[in-house]
Image: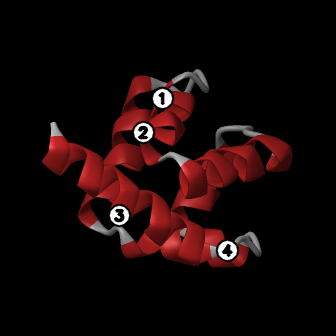
Amino acid sequence: MNPILALLKESNISDEQINEIFQTLTQNPLAAMATISQLGLPQDKLQMLMAQVMQNPALIKEAVEELGLDFSKVEEAKEKLQSQNQVN
């Protein structure tokens, strides 16, 4: 199992919440990070999760695929975010 999904599940995050997080991630990565930070994870687990995401972004793709979501939406969101950052 993907380490991001494993960490969320061992922290008693429901499958429904996990799916919602990754659905949000495919539409708005910043909102997903805010959602993750509001899950009530202990600080050490939250830091571990964020470190995994930052150090190995491929884990996001693996998790999205494992959940059966459309990774192309993640790529679109990332491009949209990058283009917004270039405008600002």
Q: Residue at x 46, y 58 (%)?
A: 77
Q: Give the Cα separation between the discs numbered 2 and 1.
A: 6 Å
Residue type (three-letter) at the residue carrying disc 1:
Ala
Give the residue pinned by disc 1.
34
Question: Is the residue 2 above or below the residue 24 in the image?
Answer: below
Q: Give the Cα separation between the discs numbered 2 and 4.
A: 18 Å
Q: Give the Cα separation between the discs numbered 4 and 1.
A: 21 Å
Q: Secondary structure at mark 4?
A: loop
Look at the image and name its color scheme: secondary structure
Determine contact: label 2, label 1, CB under 8 Å. Answer: yes
Residue 1 in sight: no
Give the residue pinned by disc 4.
70
Residue type (three-letter) at the residue carrying disc 3:
Glu
Q: Going by the image, does 7 lie left or right of 58?
A: right
- For residue 83, what is the image quadrant? bottom left
Residue type (three-letter) at the residue carrying disc 2:
Leu
Residue closer to the observer: 70 or 42: 70
Question: Is the residue 43 above or below the residue 71 in the image?
Answer: above
Give the residue pinned by disc 3.
79
Q: Which mark is residue 30?
A: 2
